[in-house]
Image (cartoon, helix red, strand yellow):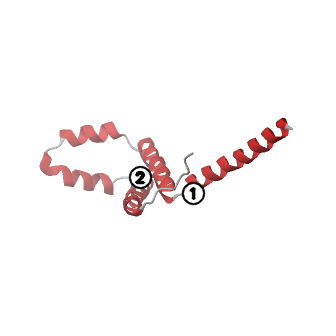
Amino acid sequence: MKNSENKVRKTIMRRVYYAYLLRMIGQPLSIQVCLLSLSLLWLTQLISIPAIMHNLLVIPVGRVPGYVWEALTGTEFIVLLVLGVIMMTALSLRVTLRFHKPIATVVG
C-alpha cells in the first residue's frame, strides 16, 4: 500500500515540476533573455571582439564615428542581421522588465 502511494505521489510531483518548468520557459522574459544570449554568442562567432576593441583604441577619438560607419557598411549582411536582432531584443527586454510581474510561487 505504501509503495503504490509513493509511486502515485512521485508521478504527480513529476507532472507538477514539468508544468512549472513549462510555465517558466513560456515567460516572455525567459524567451527574450535566451534569444539575447544566443544572439550575443552568435555575434562573437561572427566577428572578433578583441580586434574591434584594438582598432577602436588605435584610431583617434574624433574618427570613431567614421570608423563605426565604415565597419557597419563594409560588413556582411548576417552580422547586420544579428546586430539588429540584438538591438530589437534589448529594446523589447527593457519594455518587458518595466512591466514584468514575477510568477507567484507557493511556499510551504
Q: Residues within 10 Å of mark 1 (few under 14, many from 20)?
A: few
Image point (39%, 43%), residue name: 47
Q: Residues within 10 Å of mark 2 (few under 14, many from 20)?
A: some
The mark closer to the camera, 1 or 2, is 1
Residue 95 - label: none
Residue furthest out toward the right:
1
Which of the 4 quarters of the picture holds residue 5?
top right
Residue 88 horizontal/vertical position (percent) = 40, 61
Kind of residue at disc 2: Val
Residue 20 horizontal/vertical position (percent) = 61, 51
Residue designated by label 2: 79
Judging depth in this view, the residue of 9 and 29 nearest the camera is 9
Q: Earlier in the sequence, mark 1 or mark 2?
A: 1
Kind of residue at disc 1: Gly
Image point (45%, 42%), residue name: 45
Residue 26 - label: 1
User: Horizontally, is 7 left or right of 67 in the view?
Assistant: right
Q: Secondary structure at mark 1?
A: loop
Image point (74%, 41%), residue name: 10
Q: Secondary structure at mark 2?
A: helix
Judging depth in this view, the residue of 16 and 55 nearest the camera is 16
User: Horizontally, is 26 left or right of 1 in the view?
Assistant: left
Image quarter hosting the C terminus: top right
Are the residues tagged 1 and 2 within 8 Å (C-beta)? Answer: no
Report, in whole angstroms, how far the alpha carbon at label 1 lies from the one at label 2: 28 Å
Residue 32 horizontal/vertical position (percent) = 47, 55
Residue 85 horizontal/vertical position (percent) = 43, 58
Judging depth in this view, the residue of 25 and 78 nearest the camera is 25
